Image (cartoon, helix red, strand yellow):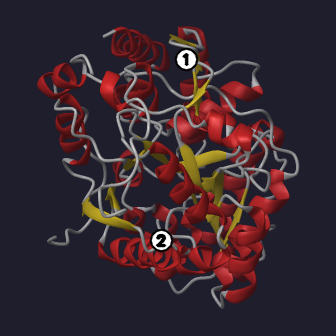
Amino acid sequence: MTAYHPLPRRRVLSGVVAAMLALPLALGACSSDDGAADDGKIELSFFWWGGEARAQLTEQALALYTQKHPEVTFKKTWQANQGYFDKLATLTAGNDAPDIFQIDDNYLAEYATRNVTADLAEYTKSGKIDTSKFQKGLVEYGTVDGKLAGLAPGENTQGLVYNKAKLDAAGVALPTTGQTWEEHIAWAKDAAAKTKVAGTMDPSADYKAFWLWLRQQGKELYNGSELGFTQADVQAWFELWKGARDGQSTPTPDVIHEGNATDVTKQLVVTNKALTSWVWANQLPELQKNTKDDLAVIAYPGDATKQWARASMYFSVYRGSKHKDVAADVLNFLVNDPEAGKILGTDRGLPSNLDIRSQVAASTDNAAMKETIQVMDELGKNFGPAPTVPPKGHSTVRSELIKAAEEAQYGRATPAQAAEQFFAASQAAIKR
Protein backbone atom coordinates (compact mmCIF):
# COMPACT_ATOMS: atom_id res chain seq x y z
CA MET A 1 0.00 0.00 0.00
CA THR A 2 1.02 3.60 -0.22
CA ALA A 3 3.67 4.64 2.26
CA TYR A 4 3.00 7.52 4.60
CA HIS A 5 5.31 9.56 6.77
CA PRO A 6 4.50 9.11 10.48
CA LEU A 7 2.78 12.04 12.15
CA PRO A 8 3.42 13.12 15.78
CA ARG A 9 0.48 11.50 17.53
CA ARG A 10 -2.88 10.16 16.50
CA ARG A 11 -5.94 11.96 17.72
CA VAL A 12 -8.21 10.53 20.37
CA LEU A 13 -10.92 8.19 19.09
CA SER A 14 -13.96 10.14 18.04
CA GLY A 15 -17.27 9.46 19.71
CA VAL A 16 -18.57 7.76 16.60
CA VAL A 17 -15.62 5.40 16.33
CA ALA A 18 -15.68 4.65 20.03
CA ALA A 19 -19.37 3.84 19.72
CA MET A 20 -18.62 1.43 16.88
CA LEU A 21 -15.96 -0.23 19.00
CA ALA A 22 -18.55 -0.70 21.73
CA LEU A 23 -20.83 -2.75 19.47
CA PRO A 24 -21.23 -6.36 20.61
CA LEU A 25 -18.76 -8.76 19.06
CA ALA A 26 -20.25 -11.84 17.48
CA LEU A 27 -17.49 -14.19 18.45
CA GLY A 28 -19.23 -17.44 19.20
CA ALA A 29 -18.41 -19.24 15.98
CA CYS A 30 -14.87 -17.82 15.91
CA SER A 31 -13.72 -18.66 19.40
CA SER A 32 -11.19 -21.27 18.32
CA ASP A 33 -9.07 -22.29 15.37
CA ASP A 34 -11.16 -23.99 12.73
CA GLY A 35 -8.20 -25.42 10.89
CA ALA A 36 -6.66 -24.50 7.57
CA ALA A 37 -8.39 -23.98 4.25
CA ASP A 38 -9.12 -26.97 1.99
CA ASP A 39 -5.68 -26.69 0.40
CA GLY A 40 -3.98 -26.66 3.82
CA LYS A 41 -3.03 -23.00 3.52
CA ILE A 42 -3.60 -20.41 6.23
CA GLU A 43 -3.61 -16.68 5.58
CA LEU A 44 -3.24 -14.38 8.58
CA SER A 45 -4.02 -10.69 8.37
CA PHE A 46 -1.47 -8.40 10.06
CA PHE A 47 -2.07 -4.67 10.64
CA TRP A 48 0.41 -2.15 12.03
CA TRP A 49 1.31 1.54 11.97
CA GLY A 50 4.68 3.03 11.11
CA GLY A 51 6.81 4.35 8.29
CA GLU A 52 8.12 2.69 5.18
CA ALA A 53 11.28 1.46 6.91
CA ARG A 54 9.21 -0.40 9.52
CA ALA A 55 7.02 -1.83 6.78
CA GLN A 56 10.02 -3.25 4.92
CA LEU A 57 11.49 -4.82 8.07
CA THR A 58 8.15 -6.31 9.15
CA GLU A 59 7.52 -7.73 5.71
CA GLN A 60 10.98 -9.32 5.67
CA ALA A 61 10.39 -10.95 9.07
CA LEU A 62 6.98 -12.28 8.02
CA ALA A 63 8.47 -13.59 4.76
CA LEU A 64 11.02 -15.47 6.86
CA TYR A 65 8.20 -17.04 8.88
CA THR A 66 6.51 -18.16 5.65
CA GLN A 67 9.82 -19.56 4.43
CA LYS A 68 9.97 -21.71 7.56
CA HIS A 69 6.20 -22.44 7.53
CA PRO A 70 5.16 -22.54 3.84
CA GLU A 71 1.53 -23.24 4.73
CA VAL A 72 1.19 -19.79 6.38
CA THR A 73 1.02 -16.56 4.38
CA PHE A 74 0.12 -13.03 5.40
CA LYS A 75 -2.23 -10.30 4.28
CA LYS A 76 -0.14 -7.29 5.32
CA THR A 77 -1.59 -3.81 5.87
CA TRP A 78 0.11 -0.78 7.35
CA GLN A 79 -0.32 2.96 7.54
CA ALA A 80 0.92 6.04 9.38
CA ASN A 81 -0.17 6.85 12.93
CA GLN A 82 -2.86 9.24 11.74
CA GLY A 83 -6.16 7.43 11.50
CA TYR A 84 -4.74 4.03 12.49
CA PHE A 85 -6.96 3.54 15.52
CA ASP A 86 -10.02 4.86 13.69
CA LYS A 87 -9.45 2.17 11.08
CA LEU A 88 -8.85 -0.53 13.68
CA ALA A 89 -12.03 0.42 15.53
CA THR A 90 -14.04 0.28 12.31
CA LEU A 91 -12.69 -3.18 11.45
CA THR A 92 -13.38 -4.40 14.96
CA ALA A 93 -16.94 -3.09 14.95
CA GLY A 94 -17.58 -5.02 11.76
CA ASN A 95 -16.14 -8.25 13.21
CA ASP A 96 -13.42 -8.00 10.58
CA ALA A 97 -10.41 -7.15 12.74
CA PRO A 98 -6.96 -8.39 11.66
CA ASP A 99 -5.75 -11.66 13.17
CA ILE A 100 -2.73 -9.75 14.55
CA PHE A 101 -2.60 -6.02 15.12
CA GLN A 102 -0.25 -3.50 16.68
CA ILE A 103 -1.52 -1.44 19.63
CA ASP A 104 -0.10 0.74 22.41
CA ASP A 105 -0.89 1.49 26.03
CA ASN A 106 -3.23 4.34 25.10
CA TYR A 107 -5.80 1.80 23.90
CA LEU A 108 -4.80 -1.66 25.12
CA ALA A 109 -7.05 -1.58 28.19
CA GLU A 110 -10.00 -0.31 26.16
CA TYR A 111 -9.73 -3.07 23.58
CA ALA A 112 -9.10 -5.71 26.24
CA THR A 113 -12.09 -4.75 28.39
CA ARG A 114 -14.31 -4.88 25.29
CA ASN A 115 -13.14 -8.46 24.66
CA VAL A 116 -11.47 -7.59 21.38
CA THR A 117 -8.10 -9.12 22.31
CA ALA A 118 -7.41 -12.80 22.89
CA ASP A 119 -5.92 -13.81 26.22
CA LEU A 120 -2.35 -14.80 25.40
CA ALA A 121 -1.70 -16.10 28.92
CA GLU A 122 -2.63 -19.64 27.90
CA TYR A 123 0.22 -19.55 25.39
CA THR A 124 2.79 -18.09 27.80
CA LYS A 125 1.81 -20.64 30.45
CA SER A 126 2.16 -23.54 28.00
CA GLY A 127 5.44 -22.18 26.64
CA LYS A 128 4.07 -21.73 23.11
CA ILE A 129 4.96 -18.08 23.60
CA ASP A 130 8.26 -18.00 25.48
CA THR A 131 8.70 -14.92 27.69
CA SER A 132 11.42 -16.42 29.90
CA LYS A 133 14.03 -14.07 28.41
CA PHE A 134 11.89 -10.94 28.86
CA GLN A 135 12.77 -8.20 31.32
CA LYS A 136 10.99 -8.46 34.66
CA GLY A 137 7.62 -6.71 34.53
CA LEU A 138 7.37 -6.46 30.75
CA VAL A 139 4.74 -9.19 30.46
CA GLU A 140 2.95 -7.73 33.46
CA TYR A 141 2.57 -4.40 31.66
CA GLY A 142 0.51 -6.11 28.94
CA THR A 143 -1.94 -7.66 31.41
CA VAL A 144 -5.47 -6.27 31.78
CA ASP A 145 -7.89 -7.72 34.33
CA GLY A 146 -5.74 -10.80 34.71
CA LYS A 147 -5.55 -11.48 30.96
CA LEU A 148 -2.50 -10.98 28.75
CA ALA A 149 -3.96 -8.64 26.14
CA GLY A 150 -0.77 -7.86 24.25
CA LEU A 151 2.79 -9.11 23.82
CA ALA A 152 5.55 -6.51 23.79
CA PRO A 153 7.99 -6.84 20.86
CA GLY A 154 10.11 -4.07 22.36
CA GLU A 155 10.95 -2.50 25.70
CA ASN A 156 11.41 1.08 26.79
CA THR A 157 11.81 3.19 29.90
CA GLN A 158 12.21 6.86 30.76
CA GLY A 159 15.52 8.40 29.70
CA LEU A 160 17.08 11.79 30.40
CA VAL A 161 19.19 12.63 27.35
CA TYR A 162 21.86 15.29 27.86
CA ASN A 163 24.40 17.15 25.73
CA LYS A 164 27.68 15.62 26.85
CA ALA A 165 29.75 17.62 24.37
CA LYS A 166 28.66 21.03 25.66
CA LEU A 167 28.99 20.02 29.30
CA ASP A 168 32.49 18.62 28.79
CA ALA A 169 33.56 21.71 26.87
CA ALA A 170 32.41 23.96 29.72
CA GLY A 171 33.93 21.76 32.41
CA VAL A 172 30.53 21.03 33.96
CA ALA A 173 30.03 17.78 35.88
CA LEU A 174 27.71 15.43 34.04
CA PRO A 175 24.28 14.62 35.51
CA THR A 176 24.09 11.20 37.11
CA THR A 177 21.45 8.59 37.81
CA GLY A 178 20.35 8.92 41.42
CA GLN A 179 20.26 12.73 41.67
CA THR A 180 17.18 13.99 43.46
CA TRP A 181 14.82 16.26 41.56
CA GLU A 182 16.04 19.22 43.57
CA GLU A 183 19.68 18.28 42.88
CA HIS A 184 18.93 18.03 39.18
CA ILE A 185 17.36 21.49 39.14
CA ALA A 186 20.34 22.93 41.04
CA TRP A 187 22.70 21.19 38.61
CA ALA A 188 20.76 22.67 35.69
CA LYS A 189 21.06 26.20 37.09
CA ASP A 190 24.83 25.84 37.44
CA ALA A 191 25.15 24.25 33.98
CA ALA A 192 23.11 27.06 32.41
CA ALA A 193 25.35 29.72 33.94
CA LYS A 194 28.50 28.04 32.64
CA THR A 195 27.33 27.02 29.16
CA LYS A 196 24.90 29.88 28.42
CA VAL A 197 22.32 27.23 27.44
CA ALA A 198 19.26 26.47 29.57
CA GLY A 199 20.14 23.62 31.89
CA THR A 200 17.07 21.46 31.60
CA MET A 201 13.85 21.23 29.66
CA ASP A 202 10.85 21.83 31.94
CA PRO A 203 9.07 18.42 32.01
CA SER A 204 6.00 19.51 33.98
CA ALA A 205 3.87 18.76 30.89
CA ASP A 206 5.48 15.33 30.43
CA TYR A 207 3.19 12.60 31.73
CA LYS A 208 5.99 10.02 32.01
CA ALA A 209 8.05 12.37 34.22
CA PHE A 210 4.99 13.12 36.36
CA TRP A 211 4.16 9.41 36.56
CA LEU A 212 7.66 8.47 37.74
CA TRP A 213 7.69 11.34 40.26
CA LEU A 214 4.36 10.04 41.63
CA ARG A 215 5.75 6.53 42.00
CA GLN A 216 8.64 7.97 43.97
CA GLN A 217 6.07 9.55 46.30
CA GLY A 218 4.34 6.20 46.80
CA LYS A 219 1.54 7.07 44.38
CA GLU A 220 0.58 6.03 40.84
CA LEU A 221 -0.85 7.78 37.81
CA TYR A 222 -3.76 5.32 37.98
CA ASN A 223 -5.18 2.86 40.46
CA GLY A 224 -7.11 0.56 38.17
CA SER A 225 -9.74 2.71 36.48
CA GLU A 226 -9.31 5.58 38.95
CA LEU A 227 -6.72 8.33 39.25
CA GLY A 228 -3.90 7.39 41.59
CA PHE A 229 -3.05 10.95 42.66
CA THR A 230 -4.70 13.97 44.24
CA GLN A 231 -5.04 17.57 43.16
CA ALA A 232 -2.47 18.44 45.85
CA ASP A 233 0.03 16.09 44.18
CA VAL A 234 -0.39 17.92 40.87
CA GLN A 235 0.05 21.28 42.59
CA ALA A 236 3.29 20.13 44.23
CA TRP A 237 4.58 18.93 40.84
CA PHE A 238 3.74 22.25 39.16
CA GLU A 239 5.29 24.21 42.05
CA LEU A 240 8.52 22.22 41.75
CA TRP A 241 8.92 23.35 38.16
CA LYS A 242 7.75 26.91 38.79
CA GLY A 243 10.68 27.15 41.17
CA ALA A 244 12.98 25.81 38.46
CA ARG A 245 11.72 28.37 35.96
CA ASP A 246 12.00 31.21 38.47
CA GLY A 247 15.57 30.11 39.22
CA GLN A 248 16.44 30.09 35.50
CA SER A 249 17.22 26.39 35.39
CA THR A 250 14.87 26.03 32.40
CA PRO A 251 14.27 27.89 29.13
CA THR A 252 11.60 30.55 28.66
CA PRO A 253 7.94 29.49 28.21
CA ASP A 254 8.01 29.88 24.42
CA VAL A 255 11.00 27.55 24.20
CA ILE A 256 9.47 25.11 26.68
CA HIS A 257 6.39 25.04 24.44
CA GLU A 258 8.62 23.93 21.54
CA GLY A 259 9.96 21.11 23.71
CA ASN A 260 6.45 19.96 24.60
CA ALA A 261 6.09 18.80 20.98
CA THR A 262 6.49 15.04 20.62
CA ASP A 263 8.54 15.27 17.42
CA VAL A 264 12.04 14.01 18.19
CA THR A 265 13.57 16.55 15.83
CA LYS A 266 12.14 19.38 17.96
CA GLN A 267 13.51 18.22 21.30
CA LEU A 268 15.53 20.99 22.92
CA VAL A 269 18.66 18.89 23.39
CA VAL A 270 18.75 18.63 19.58
CA THR A 271 17.89 22.27 18.81
CA ASN A 272 20.55 23.40 21.35
CA LYS A 273 18.00 25.28 23.44
CA ALA A 274 18.48 23.12 26.54
CA LEU A 275 21.11 20.71 27.81
CA THR A 276 18.60 17.95 28.55
CA SER A 277 15.42 16.47 27.10
CA TRP A 278 13.01 14.13 28.87
CA VAL A 279 12.30 11.30 26.45
CA TRP A 280 12.17 7.52 26.18
CA ALA A 281 15.61 5.95 26.51
CA ASN A 282 15.44 4.23 23.13
CA GLN A 283 15.09 7.63 21.41
CA LEU A 284 18.77 8.42 22.01
CA PRO A 285 19.92 7.05 18.62
CA GLU A 286 17.26 9.07 16.77
CA LEU A 287 18.15 12.21 18.71
CA GLN A 288 21.83 11.64 17.99
CA LYS A 289 21.10 11.57 14.25
CA ASN A 290 19.85 15.16 14.49
CA THR A 291 22.87 16.79 16.15
CA LYS A 292 26.64 16.76 15.76
CA ASP A 293 27.10 17.08 19.54
CA ASP A 294 27.76 13.91 21.50
CA LEU A 295 24.68 12.97 23.54
CA ALA A 296 24.26 10.51 26.42
CA VAL A 297 21.36 9.11 28.46
CA ILE A 298 20.69 8.36 32.15
CA ALA A 299 17.62 7.61 34.26
CA TYR A 300 15.21 10.34 35.31
CA PRO A 301 16.00 11.95 38.70
CA GLY A 302 14.96 10.35 41.96
CA ASP A 303 14.81 6.67 42.86
CA ALA A 304 15.57 4.83 39.62
CA THR A 305 14.08 1.60 40.98
CA LYS A 306 10.66 3.19 40.49
CA GLN A 307 11.18 3.06 36.73
CA TRP A 308 9.76 -0.01 35.05
CA ALA A 309 9.96 -2.14 31.93
CA ARG A 310 7.48 -0.46 29.62
CA ALA A 311 6.25 -2.00 26.41
CA SER A 312 7.18 0.27 23.53
CA MET A 313 4.03 -1.14 21.90
CA TYR A 314 2.22 -4.49 21.69
CA PHE A 315 1.12 -7.15 19.26
CA SER A 316 -2.38 -8.39 20.03
CA VAL A 317 -4.36 -11.28 18.58
CA TYR A 318 -8.01 -10.75 17.68
CA ARG A 319 -10.28 -12.80 19.91
CA GLY A 320 -12.44 -13.66 16.89
CA SER A 321 -9.53 -14.97 14.82
CA LYS A 322 -10.03 -18.43 13.35
CA HIS A 323 -6.30 -19.09 13.68
CA LYS A 324 -5.32 -17.90 17.15
CA ASP A 325 -2.86 -20.77 17.70
CA VAL A 326 -0.98 -19.93 14.52
CA ALA A 327 -1.09 -16.21 15.33
CA ALA A 328 0.42 -16.95 18.73
CA ASP A 329 3.20 -18.93 17.05
CA VAL A 330 3.91 -15.96 14.78
CA LEU A 331 4.25 -13.68 17.82
CA ASN A 332 6.59 -16.16 19.47
CA PHE A 333 8.67 -16.20 16.28
CA LEU A 334 8.86 -12.41 16.00
CA VAL A 335 10.11 -11.92 19.57
CA ASN A 336 12.30 -15.01 19.99
CA ASP A 337 13.73 -16.10 16.64
CA PRO A 338 17.36 -14.90 16.25
CA GLU A 339 17.02 -14.37 12.49
CA ALA A 340 13.80 -12.38 12.93
CA GLY A 341 15.48 -10.38 15.69
CA LYS A 342 18.36 -9.52 13.40
CA ILE A 343 15.90 -8.25 10.78
CA LEU A 344 13.66 -6.24 13.11
CA GLY A 345 16.49 -4.79 15.19
CA THR A 346 15.33 -1.94 17.42
CA ASP A 347 12.60 -0.54 15.17
CA ARG A 348 9.91 -1.23 17.77
CA GLY A 349 12.11 -0.54 20.79
CA LEU A 350 14.88 -2.59 22.34
CA PRO A 351 14.12 -6.30 21.76
CA SER A 352 12.12 -7.79 24.63
CA ASN A 353 14.13 -11.00 24.50
CA LEU A 354 17.37 -10.12 26.29
CA ASP A 355 19.40 -12.64 24.27
CA ILE A 356 18.17 -11.07 21.03
CA ARG A 357 18.96 -7.66 22.48
CA SER A 358 22.54 -8.73 23.22
CA GLN A 359 22.81 -10.03 19.67
CA VAL A 360 21.67 -6.67 18.29
CA ALA A 361 24.05 -4.79 20.59
CA ALA A 362 26.97 -6.93 19.45
CA SER A 363 26.19 -6.52 15.77
CA THR A 364 25.44 -2.77 15.62
CA ASP A 365 28.08 -0.13 14.98
CA ASN A 366 25.75 2.61 16.27
CA ALA A 367 27.41 3.99 19.42
CA ALA A 368 24.20 5.61 20.64
CA MET A 369 22.32 2.33 20.26
CA LYS A 370 25.01 0.45 22.16
CA GLU A 371 24.84 3.00 24.97
CA THR A 372 21.04 2.87 25.09
CA ILE A 373 21.06 -0.92 25.43
CA GLN A 374 23.77 -0.75 28.08
CA VAL A 375 21.89 1.87 30.13
CA MET A 376 18.56 0.05 29.89
CA ASP A 377 20.12 -3.27 30.81
CA GLU A 378 21.75 -1.63 33.84
CA LEU A 379 18.50 0.04 34.91
CA GLY A 380 16.63 -3.19 34.29
CA LYS A 381 18.54 -4.90 37.10
CA ASN A 382 16.61 -2.76 39.58
CA PHE A 383 13.30 -2.10 37.82
CA GLY A 384 10.33 -1.92 40.13
CA PRO A 385 7.04 -3.70 39.48
CA ALA A 386 5.14 -2.51 36.45
CA PRO A 387 2.05 -0.36 37.04
CA THR A 388 -1.31 -1.37 35.67
CA VAL A 389 -1.94 -0.61 32.01
CA PRO A 390 -3.52 2.86 31.70
CA PRO A 391 -7.33 2.85 31.51
CA LYS A 392 -9.56 4.27 28.80
CA GLY A 393 -9.07 8.02 28.56
CA HIS A 394 -5.30 7.93 29.09
CA SER A 395 -4.54 9.78 25.86
CA THR A 396 -6.86 12.59 26.96
CA VAL A 397 -5.17 12.74 30.37
CA ARG A 398 -1.84 13.18 28.60
CA SER A 399 -3.08 16.05 26.45
CA GLU A 400 -4.80 17.72 29.41
CA LEU A 401 -1.53 17.67 31.37
CA ILE A 402 0.14 19.60 28.56
CA LYS A 403 -2.67 22.17 28.54
CA ALA A 404 -2.60 22.73 32.30
CA ALA A 405 1.19 22.73 32.57
CA GLU A 406 1.47 25.33 29.82
CA GLU A 407 -1.02 27.55 31.64
CA ALA A 408 1.38 27.48 34.59
CA GLN A 409 4.49 27.76 32.42
CA TYR A 410 3.22 30.93 30.76
CA GLY A 411 2.03 32.35 34.07
CA ARG A 412 -1.59 32.40 32.98
CA ALA A 413 -2.46 30.28 36.01
CA THR A 414 -0.90 29.59 39.39
CA PRO A 415 0.26 26.03 40.10
CA ALA A 416 -2.85 25.61 42.25
CA GLN A 417 -5.19 26.80 39.47
CA ALA A 418 -3.46 24.69 36.84
CA ALA A 419 -3.62 21.66 39.14
CA GLU A 420 -7.35 22.14 39.64
CA GLN A 421 -7.84 22.36 35.87
CA PHE A 422 -5.86 19.20 35.16
CA PHE A 423 -7.34 17.14 37.97
CA ALA A 424 -10.92 17.91 36.94
CA ALA A 425 -10.21 17.22 33.26
CA SER A 426 -8.47 13.94 34.10
CA GLN A 427 -11.34 12.71 36.25
CA ALA A 428 -13.77 13.47 33.43
CA ALA A 429 -11.55 11.73 30.84
CA ILE A 430 -11.38 8.35 32.55
CA LYS A 431 -15.07 8.31 33.48
CA ARG A 432 -16.40 8.85 29.93
The tag earlier along the polypeptide, 1 or 2, is 1
Q: Residues within 10 Å of mark 2 (few under 14, many from 20)?
A: many
The answer to whether 262 appears left or right of 233 in the picture is left
Tell me what residue is drawn at x 25 percent, y 61 percent. 77
Residue 317 visible in rendering: yes
The answer to whether 66 appears left or right of 201 in the picture is left
Q: How many marks?
A: 2
Circle 2 is placed at which residue position?
Answer: 270
The image position of residue 406, as x and y in percent, is: 37, 34
The image position of residue 337, as x and y in percent, is: 64, 70
Tell me what residue is drawn at x 51 percent, y 59 percent. 330
Which of the labelled discs sits on residue 146, or is there none? none
Q: Residues within 10 Å of mark 1 (few under 14, many from 20)?
A: some
Tell me what residue is drawn at x 23 percent, y 69 percent. 5
Question: How far apart are the alpha carbons under marks 1 and 2?
Answer: 30 Å
Q: Is residue 412 above or below residue 46?
A: above
The amino acid on which the numbered mark 2 sits, given as a three-letter code, is Val
| Occupied quadrant, residue 211 | top right
Disc 2 on helix, strand or loop? helix
Circle 1 is placed at which residue position?
Answer: 235
Question: Which of the two residues, 387 or 36, is positioned nearer the viewer here?
Answer: 36
Disc 1 on helix, strand or loop? helix
The image position of residue 50, as x and y in percent, is: 33, 63
Q: Which corner quadrant holds the C terminus?
A: top left
The amino acid on which the numbered mark 1 sits, given as a three-letter code, is Gln
Q: Is residue 165 above or below residue 393?
A: below
The answer to whether 428 appears left or right of 283 in the picture is left
